[in-house]
Structure formats: structure tokens, C-alpha cells
């Protein structure tokens, strides 16, 4: 089900064969800014898999089939009955760690019986509409934390309904209902929010987050991705053990962080990932090898690198009709100093999307660097015809004169 219900990048053209592991067929989006709120709640249209991976239910072995009929996709029960098949005084022997206590009572939810506020989904599965009509519920099944809203700016279920109240009011109400709650402790959303605001001063906190193995893999991978922007030799060394993490999301994200490692150490750290059993990790390693200058490698590593590069190139070809893919292919051409290939890819990108000003800029610069002033001027003229208001393109054209 995750193959359809996830924000992801496909590696192949068409649908993978049934039974193909997710990370062999797709690269899953992490909790990126613009897609998710800092605490991991849905923001953009991210579907449900990335949310579900954050949940305690996923960590305890709950699957989609526990709540949804696999063939019809209909819910197995209506209303709170769906939740109380596990969350009740009777519990569920399949999940023995669940607390057996009444949940579908006012003593738990503090709302009138039968009201919207008494519905489990109202508090634990915030709903957002996409395309104006398609309601999607957040599948992280989180406990409402209006206290976090004050710090991270993320929404909360309480003020979703009580829109005339503040997050501080909601936090006070929950404090009164559950004065001794253990669910108001530190949350990864606090670190991610701080990292988004000031990445330079949160390196240590983000590194701690990545190393905390009790957290969901998608959260730790997000922290590693955020650290890539400020990668240093010290940080790359500290987090090198993440390259052997059990979660492929973490291993793939850790590969990018090795950009901060010295060139003398980076190949040895990344080489084992070229033969990783999971394609998303192999491709991540291949991308990092692209920028390395290695005169000679052992034959085994060379073979693994070639296979990983083929995996990556195949994934790009499967998405060649997207301008973003052509930009990546152009970047590969630049890195490998194949200027003809870079020009061709940038050309395909602007054919697909003539408003990609930076692709036009790169084509002009490549022509100029290769000493072909006439081609540079012709390219600039074509670019301005498509983007007449572009200040950068007009300035470049003036410089070429």
C-alpha cells in the first residue's frame, strides 16, 4: 500500500512487481520543510506513509490491514469501534504492551459522548483537505500537543476545532486534564523547528537526534539531511556509524553527510554502500562517488560502483520527462566535465519548462566558457524571448555584447 500512499520518487518506469520492497522501488521523502510541519504533521500533499512511519503503532507492528480491508480499502469498523478493537479495557492479545483501560469515555477525551470531540480521529488524526475536496488524515496517530505549537508553529487538534482559542489555552486545558502526563516531554519537532530557523547553531542537537535510535528512522534521516548543509570533517566522522544503521532511510541520508569528510577517507566509508542490499542506499552512494577523484580502485569496488551508477542512471531515465530530472542529469554532466551532455540536458529542461531561468543561465555560461560567444548570444536571445522580464538574463545578454 505504501507504494501508492507515499510522497516518493520512483526508480523505475511503471509499477514495480508485487512484492518488491518499497526502498527497492522508491525514494521516500523525509520530513522536509514545505512538505511537513516541523513536528512531522502533514502540511503539503504527502499522503500517509511518511506519517505512519512516525507512529508508535508502526513501531509496535500495526499494519494497514489492521484498520483497512486490503482489497476494498474500506475501514474494518466505523467510528471509535475501529480504535477500540485494540484501545480498550479488553485490549488486543496481538499487541500485549497496550494499556488496558477505557478510552471511549469522557474520563479520557473530556468531551460529550457522541460529539465530534469524542471521536478518536478528531484528536489523534488531524484532517486536511487537498485539491479542495479530498480530506486526508494524518496517520502518525499523535497525542495532541498544543504546548508544542507555541514553540514550533505546528498545528494541534485542539485549536483545529476550537479555532477561536489559542494554543496556550489548549495547553492549559490539557494540563488540567492530565497534570501528571508523561506525554509532554521533549519532542523531535522542537529540534527540527530550531534547525529550520538556525541550522548553524543546532548542529549538535540535530546530530543527537540522528543518533537517538529510539526515534523513527524517517525522523533520524531528516536530521541527517538537514546536517548535510553544514557538514564538516568532525561531523562526518561522528555520524559515520549511521552508514551501517538498520534503517535504509538513515543509511541513504548518512551517505550525503560524508560530503564533509576528507577526500582521503570518504571513498572507504562510502564503498560498502555501493553493494548495499537496498537500491535507495546504493543510489545515494553512487551520487556521492560522482564528485570523488579516484585514480584507481580495487576491481570489486569498481564493479559495485558501476552497478550502482546503472541503478541511478536507470532511475533518471525513468523520469526523463520531468525538467527537474534533466537538471540533475545536467549536473552529472558538469561534474564529470562532459559539457556536451550538460548542454543537452539543460536544453531538454528548458524545452519542457522554458521558465527555468537558471537552466538558460547555465547554458549561456557553458557556451561562453567553451569560447563560443555566438552560441552564448543566440542562447541568451532565445532565453529572453521566453523570459522577457528576467533581469539576470538581460544583464547577461548585455555583458555578452
Image (spheres, helix red, strand yellow):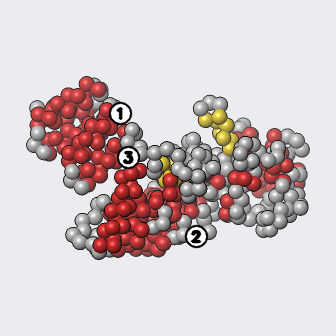
Picture layout, residue 49 above or below residue 161: below
Q: For the residues marked 1 and 3, what is the alpha-carbon distance in whole angstroms?
A: 15 Å
How many marks do you count on the picture? Answer: 3
Q: Where does the image place residue 272, in percent across and percent down from the top left?
A: 40, 71
Q: Earlier in the sequence, mark 2 or mark 1?
A: 2
Q: Earlier in the sequence, mark 1 or mark 3?
A: 3
Q: Give 111 or 170, whichever is nearer the viewer.
A: 111
- Front of the two marks 1 and 3: 3
Query: What residue sits right under mark 3 in the picture?
Result: 317
Q: Give 195 or 368, whichever is nearer the viewer.
A: 368
Query: What residue sits right under mark 2 in the picture?
Result: 213
Mark 1 surroundings within 10 Å by alpha-carbon count, few (fewer than 14), some (14 through 19), many (20 or more): some
Position of 282 with respect to 370 (left or right) is: right
Mark 2 surroundings within 10 Å by alpha-carbon count, few (fewer than 14), some (14 through 19), many (20 or more): few
Picture layout, residue 285 above or below residue 26: below
Identify the residue at image location x=25%, y=41%. Answer: 344
Instruction: Please say whether residue 158 is visible from this viewpoint.
Output: no
Q: For the residues marked 3 and 2, what is the alpha-carbon distance in whole angstroms?
A: 35 Å
Query: Tag 1, which secondary structure?
Result: helix
Q: Quadrant of residue 312?
A: bottom left
Query: Tag 2, which secondary structure?
Result: loop
Q: Give 65 or 401, whichever is nearer the viewer.
A: 65
Q: Quadrant of residue 391?
A: top left
Identify the residue at image location x=59%, y=56%. Answer: 19
Which residue in the rendered view is the most extreme toward the front? 17
Query: What residue sits right under mark 1 in the picture?
Result: 352
| Marks 1 & 3, CB-CB < 8 Å contact | no
Q: Earlier in the sequence, mark 3 or mark 2?
A: 2
Amino acid at each position: 500500500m505504501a507504494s501508492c500512499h507515499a510522497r516518493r520518487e520512483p526508480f523505475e518506469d511503471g509499477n514495480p512487481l508485487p512484492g518488491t520492497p518499497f526502498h527497492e522501488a522508491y525514494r521516500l521523502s523525509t520530513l522536509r520543510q514545505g512538505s511537513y510541519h516541523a513536528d512531522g504533521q502533514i502540511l503539503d500533499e504527502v499522503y500517509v506513509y511518511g506519517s505512519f512511519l512516525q507512529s508508535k503503532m508502526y513501531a509496535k507492528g500495526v499494519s494497514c490491514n489492521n484498520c483497512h480491508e486490503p482489497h476494498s480499502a474500506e475501514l474494518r469498523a466505523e467510528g471509535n469501534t475501529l480504535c477500540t478493537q485494540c484501545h480498550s479495557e479488553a485490549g488486543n492479545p496481538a499487541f500485549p504492551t497496550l494499556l488496558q483501560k477505557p478510552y471511549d469515555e469522557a474520563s479520557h477525551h473530556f468531551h460529550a459522548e457522541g460529539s465530534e470531540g469524542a471521536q478518536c480521529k478528531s484528536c489523534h488524526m488531524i484532517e486536511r483537505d487537498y485539491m479542495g475536496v479530498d480530506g486526508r488524515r494524518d496517520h502518525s496517530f499523535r497525542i495532541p500537543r498544543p504546548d508544542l505549537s507555541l514553540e514550533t508553529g505546528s498545528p494541534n487538534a485542539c485549536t483545529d476545532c476550537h479555532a477561536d482559542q489559542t494554543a496556550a489555552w489548549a495547553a492549559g486545558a490539557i494540563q488540567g486534564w492530565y497534570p501528571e502526563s508523561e506525554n509532554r516531554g521533549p519532542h523531535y519537532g522542537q529540534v527540527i523547528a530550531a534547525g529550520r530557523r538556525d541550522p548553524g547553531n543546532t548542529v549538535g542537537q540535530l546530530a543527537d537526534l540522528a543518533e537517538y535510535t529510539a526515534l523513527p528512522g524517517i525522523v533520524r534521516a531528516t536530521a541527517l539531511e538537514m546536517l548535510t548543509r553544514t557538514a564538516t570533517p568532525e561531523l562526518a566522522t561522528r555520524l559515520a556509524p549511521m552508514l551501517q544503521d538498520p534503517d535504509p532511510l538513515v543509511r541513504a541520508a548518512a551517505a550525503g553527510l560524508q560530503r564533509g569528510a576528507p577526500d582521503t577517507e570518504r571513498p572507504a566509508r562510502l564503498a560498502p554502500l555501493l553493494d548495499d542490499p537496498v537500491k535507495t542506499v546504493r543510489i545515494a552512494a553512487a551520487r556521492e562517488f560522482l564528485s570523488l577523484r579516484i585514480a584507481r580502485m580495487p576491481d570489486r569496488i569498481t564493479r559495485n560502483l558501476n552497478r550502482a551508477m546503472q541503478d541511478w542512471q536507470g532511475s533518471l531515465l525513468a523520469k526523463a520527462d520531468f525538467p527537474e530530472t534533466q537538471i540533475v542529469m545536467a549536473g552529472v554532466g558538469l561534474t564529470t566535465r562532459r559539457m556536451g551532455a550538460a548542454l543537452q540536458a539543460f536544453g531538454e529542461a528548458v524545452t519542457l519548462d522554458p521558465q527555468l531561468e537558471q537552466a538558460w543561465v547555465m547554458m549561456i555560461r557553458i557556451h561562453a566558457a567553451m569560447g563560443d560567444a555566438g552560441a552564448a548570444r543566440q542562447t541568451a536571445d532565445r532565453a529572453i524571448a521566453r523570459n522577457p522580464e528576467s533581469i539576470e538574463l538581460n544583464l547577461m545578454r548585455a555583458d555578452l555584447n
